Amino acid sequence: MGFYGETINQGRFDALLPVLSEDVVFWFNSGSHKGIAAARQAFEATWAGINDEHYWLEDLVWLSGDEACACCIYRFRWRGMVDGKWIEGGGRGTTVLRREPRGWVIVHEHLSAEPK
C-alpha cells in the first residue's frame, strides 16, 4: 500500500497503472467505477477539483493475506486547495489485493465517509 499512497499524490493516473488490475472496481461516494477507464475518469475528476492535494493512510490493519490475495482496512485522509481555500477530509477504506503474474495489484477499493 506504500507505493499506492505515495503515487496517488502525483495526480497522474498512468503512474497508478502498475498497481491496478485491469478489472479493478472502486466504490467511492461518487459512485461505482469498474475497470481502468472508469477508474481513470473518477480519479481525474477528483484531481481536477482539488489543487495541491495530499492523500495518506492511517491505522492500516491487514485482515487477511496469503500467496494469492490480501485485504486491509484503514482510515484515509486528504487535504488540498478547493476554490482557493485549504480544506481536508477523510473516511474509512477497504482494499483487496490480488497477486497477478506482474505482482500485487488492487482489485477492489471501497472508500466511504466516517459515520456520523
Image: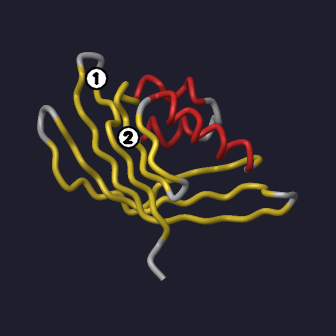
Q: Identify the residue at image location x=35%, y=57%.
A: 60
Residue 10 position by quadrant? top right
Q: Residues within 10 Å of mark 1 (few under 14, many from 20)?
A: few
Residue 81 position by quadrant? bottom right
Check the image and name the residue furthest to the right.
84
Is 87 situated left or right of 18 in this image?
right
Q: Identify the residue at image location x=38%, y=63%.
A: 59
Q: Identity of the amino acid at label 1?
A: Gly
For marks 1 and 2, give the CA distance: 18 Å
Q: Identify the residue at image location x=37%, y=34%.
A: 24
- Residue highlighted by disc 1: 103
Say which mark, if any, is on residue 62: none
Q: Identify the residue at image location x=74%, y=49%.
A: 49
Image coords of residue 72 (percent x, y):
28, 52
Image coords of residue 37 (percent x, y):
51, 28
- Residue highlighted by disc 2: 25
Residues at marks 1 and 2 touching, judged by CB atoms closer than 8 Å: no
Image coords of residue 91 (percent x, y):
49, 65
Rendered view: 61 above or below 53: below
Q: Identity of the amino acid at label 2?
A: Val
